[in-house]
Amino acid sequence: MIISNVIVCDSRGEKNVDVRVENGLISEVGSNLEGDSVLDGKGAYLLPGLVDTNVRLQDAQLNAKSLEKLSKKALKGGVTRAILAPDSTPAIDNEIVLEFLELQHNKGAKIQPCIATTIEDEVLSNIAILLKRGAVAPYMSTVISNNLACRIAEYVKMYDVTLFCRCKDKSLSEIGVMNEGNMATKLGLVGIAPLGEMVHVARMIEIARHFGIKILFKSVSNPQSIALITKAKQEGVKVSCEVSIHHLCVDDTACDDFNTTAKIDPPLMDKSDVKAFIKALKNSEIDILTSMHQPNSPVNKEVAFFDASFGCECIEDIMSLYYTKLVKPGIVTMSTLIKLCVENPALSLKKTHRRMEVGQKADLILFDVNTSYVVDNPQSLYHGETLSGKVQSAFVDGVIIAF
């Protein structure tokens, strides 16, 4: 098949060329390609499929139905590879659960699991066997002891993988439900102190420095944490950071009127923090973007704010959100977006660069920037908003799926 009349874009830039896809691979990139089967892209972008390194299942329930639902929604949003966090029920911390995931063959985005490095934050899981069995990365939360963290670091070094690390302080966040600040005070809700994340980022940077390991800090929500990570990079420490789209474009005033859709973890920050994150993004201090997709049933969200589950949905709109909130306003270019959402995530997983070149897998999306639509999802922070651009179709292993 030939995909013609498209703007091909990856982290290196944009160009108007045709792409030939054969046997699930990109076999030729050039001008005026000819063949029996031609798809006219009508001037849309042809992009490598997004890689989202931080997604969860509905109500954190790990089963075939929830996996299939996530797979289809992710692909609709332009994500062809989704990395599943291990804090589900059951948790991804043993061979039986990992084998169950390997046996799933969803018809949308490919879902790959992280593994929990600890069982109930107390003892190590069988990290070595789980990594050998196909888990893409080990995941840990800093609520564990320094002793366990150092033992995990030794496994990470042994297998030369990236440690996915969520930094939080249990004593400062256990009963909090939103960011500690003026909005929490107005609503009379218990706040989560931003200090907790920053303290543990500093701790894990030193562990990365000592053991010489790679760490990806997950869903960073404090701009001061970004500053620490940036300084560590300059010193040669192998650390990087992931930030959600929410923390780049929504502040904690979204929680006003006890709006439980805005109750996410880590929490939305204040307006000054959002501005600081945008500045960090422009300065190339943020490495990876994520939808931080964490869907919940209405029964778990349409309750009192304190009792509501953390999380919101957005993965089926994520490419349009990135374009509308970041590319269209000129905060980043489309090429930079692909670096943040494709190349850097792939590198953190020790995958190929996923560039638009001969020999690469044909995991592609056709994205039309001239189309707009209104988000119709009460479980989304962006419900009722008009987004620019829409994924028209996706190519997974060379198979076309139109939307």
Image (cartoon, rainbow, N blue to C red):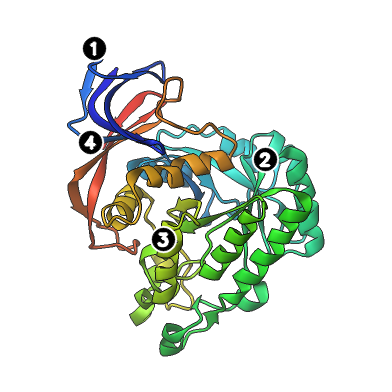
Indicate the position of residue 393 as horizontal and vertical percent values. Answer: 28, 34
Q: Earlier in the sequence, mark 3 or mark 4?
A: 4
Q: Which of marks 4 and 1 is nearer the N terminus?
A: 1
Residue matched to label 2: 96
Residue matched to label 4: 44
Q: What residue type is labelled 4?
A: Ala
Indicate the position of residue 232 as horizontal and vertical percent values. Answer: 64, 58
Q: Which amino acid does label 1 sit on?
A: Glu
Q: Earlier in the sequence, mark 1 or mark 3?
A: 1
Element at label 2: helix
Residue matched to label 1: 34
Point out the frontmost of discs 3 and 4: 4
Q: Earlier in the sequence, mark 1 or mark 2?
A: 1
Residue matched to label 3: 297
Sort mark 4 into few (<14), some (14-19) or many (20+) by Cα contacts within 10 Å: many
Sort mark 2 into few (<14), some (14-19) or many (20+) by Cα contacts within 10 Å: few
Q: Earlier in the sequence, mark 2 or mark 4?
A: 4
Sort mark 1 into few (<14), some (14-19) or many (20+) by Cα contacts within 10 Å: few
Element at label 1: loop
Point out the frontmost of discs 2 and 4: 4
Which image quadrant is residue 209 in? bottom right
Contact (CB < 8 A) between labels 3 and 2? no
Q: What residue type is labelled 3?
A: Ser
